[in-house]
Amino acid sequence: MLLGIICNEKTQGLDTLQAVNHLYLRAVAEHMDVQPVLIPAAMPGQKFNAERLLDKLDGVLITGNRSNIHPSHYGVPATPAHEPFDKNRDAAAFSLLDGALTRDLPTLAVCRGMQELNIVCGGSLATDIQTQANKLDHRTPDADTLQGRYASRHTAAFLEDGYFHTLLGVPQAQTNSLHWQAIDKLGDDLIVEARAEDGTIEAVRHAKASHCIGVQWHPEYQPGENIISAKLFADLQRAIQER
């Protein structure tokens, strides 16, 4: 079984790389029995066509990244507050998500990935949510270690009898938080599966897909008392096997 995992454009010295944070690969190796297939973003000026690629895949993981979706994709003028961008990642992610939904391919979308899923479904995003009244600071904490960066930050309250409530058997859980953009207008056919205590949407499910889940937190690395990650990745494995 093949799990497609989208890459991000990274700069290292003089080199430009297509890369995936190793934490995603480690999580997949620990909790799933699939062969990861890394999917580079589109090249500049190239139209990304996911059709033939998706025909070979059994599932898709749309990863997070520090870059943001270009706001032109949801009808907002770009400003420095929206940066940094990765337009080639945008093109690849939108094509992959659109094709995965058309094929009903099991999908897990993480952080930026959940925001991309929302845009594909016709939604929009809010920027600098920490400046809004009564909102938590969801941004990545200053930390010198992975444990500090990905430490639990707030509670995610799950939809009663929804996906996470059923999967985990609890009404809420602690999650990390490494984002400063969030869903504003919810996309078509998306159901809110979890919210932070300030109302921020923390997880969604596509109502017409057999398995398409988006989470705003980072399940690939949740140190401490983590009841989510193993079951979330294992359920993606189940969906792939049952497809």
Image: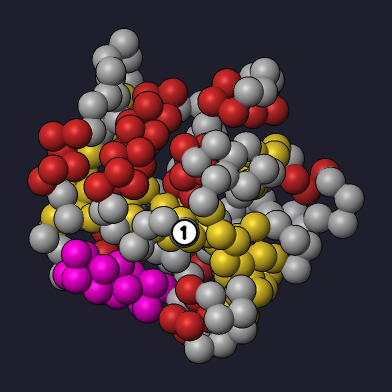
Camera-side residue: 135 or 21? 135
Point 32% across, 73% down: residue: 235
Label 1 secondary element:
loop
Q: In the rendered structure, which segment of residues is drawn in magenta?
A: 229-243
Image-based side of 77 in relation to 207, left or right: right
In reply to whether residue 108 is colored magenta, the answer given is: no
Q: Position of residue 109 (x, y in %)?
A: 42, 53
Q: Position of residue 27 (x, y in %)?
A: 31, 66
Point 75% across, 54% down: residue: 137
Relative vertical location of residue 81 with respect to residue 138 in this rendering, above or below: above
Q: Looking at the figure, which quarter contains the N terminus?
A: bottom left
Q: Position of residue 117 (x, y in %)?
A: 47, 44
In reply to whether residue 231 is colored magenta, the answer given is: yes
Q: Which residue is mark 1?
A: 207
Point 29% across, 58% down: residue: 106
Camera-side residue: 91 or 188? 188
Q: Position of residue 128 (x, y in %)?
A: 73, 40
Residue 182 visible in the shown view: yes
Camera-side residue: 106 or 43? 106
Relative vertical location of residue 73 with respect to residue 29 in this rendering, above or below: above
Relative vertical location of residue 132 with respect to residue 92 in this rendering, above or below: below
Magenta stretch: dominant SS?
helix
Image-based side of 42 in relation to 126, left or right: left
